[in-house]
Image (cartoon, rainbow, N blue to C red):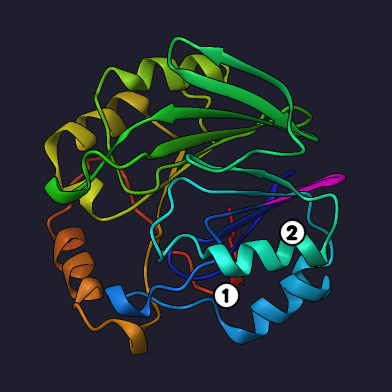
Amino acid sequence: MTRIFYTVNAGLYLTSGQTALLIDGIHEGASSGFSAMPAMLSEQLLYGYGVFAHLDGLLFTHLHPDHYDADKVNRMLDTRSGLALWGPGLSSRGISEYRETPSGCTFRIGDFRIFAYPTVHSGASFREEPHRSLLVRNETTNEAFLISGDAVFAPELADTVNKNAGGPGSVTAAFINVYQLIEEPSRAFLLRLAPVRLFLYHRPLPEDDTCNYLFMIRTTLDRKPLPGYDIAQPAQMNWIRF
């Protein structure tokens, strides 16, 4: 079974068997109303103990500062040899079985096969920036997790994601941000995808929320934007309960 630890912002640590991945988990973010990576987790990650005693790869949906910090990533790669790396605009390393597909690309890191779909970043000023949403499929347990990042989803992409996950209803959980509950194409995508669980992530710690992002989340959820779903907000700095 895959275990998932939610850090802050969009940071997710997935571990299963002999493989552990960190997605969008090395970042800053305070300048944009989000959180920097907590010092305790930064130290554990750099020196390989605690939550991050085992780590095989770093993945990124895109390179905005609330998802990615180049200096910290480079220091990690220098300190912990053998780490795989993948992200749009980065020089990948340590990945296997890479191939291009009509919907993006796919590759493997240990127990996990990753499908990376080109998706448009939410917000008019970011539409041209490289962005990928990720489907992480555990080849051992047949679980599949959609990591949305900051995407605006096209509804028809749901059919491709479900196919890659193993068929309709095979997405174990989708991790989404609040804009995907506000924008109609993304809501249509999520209803068509029909994941088993929905988790609203991409949230700063309350003390860093200078842009009232958490208020927008509360008011959006109050409107029950996706009928039939109880959308969970996993606690930051904690393992997620399924």
The residue nearer to you, when weighing 162 against 26, is 26
On screen, residue 98 versus residue 17, left or right, reads left
Residue 134 percent across, percent down from the top left: 50, 36
Q: Which one is in front, 228 or 130? A: 130
When the figure is inspected, residue 14 is found, relative to residue 80, above or below; the finding is above
Q: Which residue does the image show at 37% across and 29% down from the upper left? A: 194
Query: Which residue is most to the top?
Result: 102
Q: CA distance from mark 1 to mark 2?
A: 23 Å
Q: Amino acid at mark 2?
A: Leu
Residue 17, given in percent of the width and then of the height, sits at 85, 44
The residue under label 2 is: 77
- Residue at numbered disc 1: 237
| Identity, as a three-letter code, of the amino acid under mark 1 | Met
Please check the rendered image and state whether residue 117 is part of the magenta-colored stretch, yes or no.
no
The x and y percentages for residue 62 are 43, 48
Judge left or right: residue 84 versus residue 212: right
Residues packed near mark 2 inside 10 Å, few (<14), some (14 to 19) or many (20 plus): some
> Of label 1 and label 2, which has the lower sequence position?
2
Query: In the image, 105: left or right of 45?
Result: left
Q: Residue at x 28, y 81 (%)?
A: 209
Q: Secondary structure at mark 1?
A: loop
Part of the protein shown in magenta: 15-21
Crowding around mark 1 (Cα neighbors within 10 Å: few <14, some 14 to 19, many 20+) is: some
Up the image or down, 170 lies above or below 199; here it is above
Q: Is residue 159 left or right of residue 126?
A: right
What is the secondary structure assignment of the residue under circle 2? helix
Q: Note whether residue 167 is visible.
A: no
